[in-house]
Image (cartoon, rainbow, N blue to C red):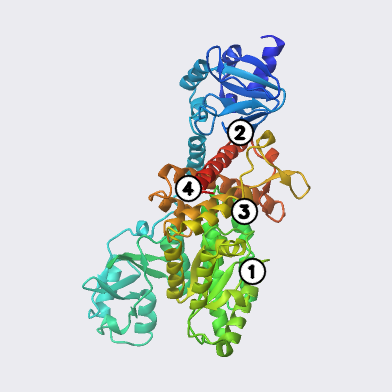
Amino acid sequence: MDIEELEIRDFIGAQRPFDQLPAEALVATVEAITVRYVRRETEIPETEQGEPALSLVRNGAVELRAETGELLARLGEGDLLGYRASAHELAKNHHYVALEDTLLYRMPASVVDRLCDEHSQIAWFLAPAGAGRLRDAVRHHDEASDSPLNLTDTRLGDLLGREPIHLPPAASIRRAAEVMSAEKVSSMLVVEEDVLFGVLTDRDLRLRVIAAGLDYDSPLSDVMTMAPVTASVDTNAYDALLMMARHRIHHLPVVDGHHVAGVVTASDFIERHTTSSVYLAADIHRQDTVETLAEVAGRLPLLVQNLAAAGASAERTQRIVTGIADALAIRLLELAELKFGAPPVDYAWVVAGSQARGEFTIASDQDNALILDDAYDDARDGDYFEALARFVCDGLAACGQAHCPGEVMATNPEWREPLANWQARFAHWIDNPDPTALMHGCTFFDLRHVYGDAALSATLRSSLLERTRGNTIFLSHLTGNALTRQPPLGFFRNFVLSGGRDETGVLDLKLAGVVPIVELARVYALAGGIDEVNTRERLKAAGTTDELSESGARDLGDALTFLSDTRFRHQARQLESGIEPDSLVAPDSLSRFERGHLKDAFAIVRTMQRSLAQRFGR
């Protein structure tokens, strides 16, 4: 090989996907390459040697434009363009133009096809759609980080290993003890005609029977725990663990519809998952002061580092962090009621934003509110709920959840209102979608119940969905608001960079990547009357309706996963280095593989934004 061919080989061999080729194949590829110099403002031909060509930018810059002249992307050194390189099939009326004097390495389609046939790595990368490449990357990470010990992906029903052991309420305590001993179980379900009446545990036998000197022939109805807390077979196992910790129970009956399916115990969870998240969640509900709660919550950053080191995904980690945030709020509300007395009227403590969506991170601040029963009287009840809100929000701040800079908290009287006022406010936002209304709506339309009277929260969400479903005027404005944040793709060298901590160029993976997907999912959900709040669940549900194609939902979900995982790993590295976590990532800190997939993810977001704009005329 001459000096020029050696230089071409070294450059191509450092670019994806050609860095996966064995040496002989790389040399053969170089021999088939044509070097083309393209002057600025010159259109790049689609063919090479009479057939479509794949081009690799050696230096310079290239613009991809639509027939209308709209800029679709700008490509730079190391980027591919043309045959089999586009994240989406290139329309016939799209064309590439050199933005500046540009040097290209070009290979005919026949050479590209041969490489794909002979090398699966090349075929995988040069799939017709970038979404497919991204999906494979996401799936590979999920498989690598998956574990049978993971509770966040485990149905409660999957923990049931045997048919339920049960007796009727009239059965004797003696008979229950005999069956429990024979079956080697620590609890007995009390069931009649397939209806769960109660549960009897080893602890009940010790305290309510033996210690109390009760006749062993007494019926189970005399000593059982009546109307026990239950969970559905479809309940997430981690959520069930939090439920058990909150209620301080070690046995949880599981139901399948109206039928009793079995019971799970604390040991079932410990056998499946022994990481500290289990103990941290349980420890929260044992604390009796804000100070000790703050000490427990102080272990959360280390837990997140451990999860990252174990290969946990961002989604799983966010669910764990959200569950712990919920547990902290619940325990603080319980302590508030002990401190200030029983509430004068029913109320619901709700969360908004990322916590509502189950996407909370250790860098998130608190967004919460109070929905009060319409029997609320400000003169009579106002001081109580003001004190309760202040106690809880300050307690959350002590536990690491910063006060919301915009005061979107229950301490703000604006977000501490009776149900009727909330409904009127939602109606006003929807009927008059000005910028302020959209700003508040994007926070509170993602609303989730945490504590108190769940009927209040459910009523508000129901009235919200009734007003937004099919409301094209409101959805048009909401779409316009969602399109104000564009992914950082399509400018010089492909990424739009902003200043970071040291004013170096960075990508804001939250505002420029994750948030646009969250906002797209919100529009789809409200348009279709979908009650889901979690972004991934919204996309899945929308993909089964006319609002969003199944492939579009899947592509956006994969983009969200890759962006979130990249952001999570970045934050974990910052925590390990003692730096306050953020979402600002320098492209140079990422591998070429990661940068390439970020481009795929951003391209998907931009394409779906355009689709939504066409759908609602923005």
Q: Is residue 132 left or right of residue 499?
A: left
Q: Which mark is residue 399?
A: 1
Quarter of image, res 81: top right
Q: Can you identify the residue that label 3 sits on?
A: 305
Percent x, y for residue 561? 53, 47
Percent x, y for residue 463? 44, 69
- Residue at the spot x=38%, y=51% of the render? 545
Cα separation, mark 3 vs mark 2, equals 47 Å
Q: Nearer the viewer, mark 3 or mark 4?
A: 4
Question: Which is more N-terminal, label 4 or label 1?
Answer: 1
Q: Nearer the viewer, mark 3 or mark 2?
A: 2
Secondary structure found at label 2: loop
Q: Can you identify the residue that label 2 sits on?
A: 69
Quarter of image, res 219: bottom left
Q: Amino acid at mark 3?
A: Gln
In the displayed structure, would residue 84 be above or below residue 551? above
Percent x, y for residue 152? 46, 56
- Residue at the spot x=72%, y=54% of the render? 579
| Residue 185 visible in the shown view | yes
Q: Can you identify the residue that label 4 sits on?
A: 615
Question: Which is more N-terminal, label 4 or label 3?
Answer: 3
Secondary structure found at label 1: loop
Percent x, y for residue 172? 24, 80
- Pointer 4 with pointer 2, Cβ within 8 A: no
- Pointer 3 with pointer 4, Cβ within 8 A: no
Q: Amino acid at mark 4?
A: Arg
Q: Nearer the viewer, mark 1 or mark 2?
A: 2
Question: Which is more N-terminal, label 2 or label 3?
Answer: 2
In the displayed structure, would residue 604 be above or below residue 306? above
Q: Amino acid at mark 1?
A: Cys
Secondary structure found at label 3: helix
Q: Is residue 423 left or right of residue 193?
A: right
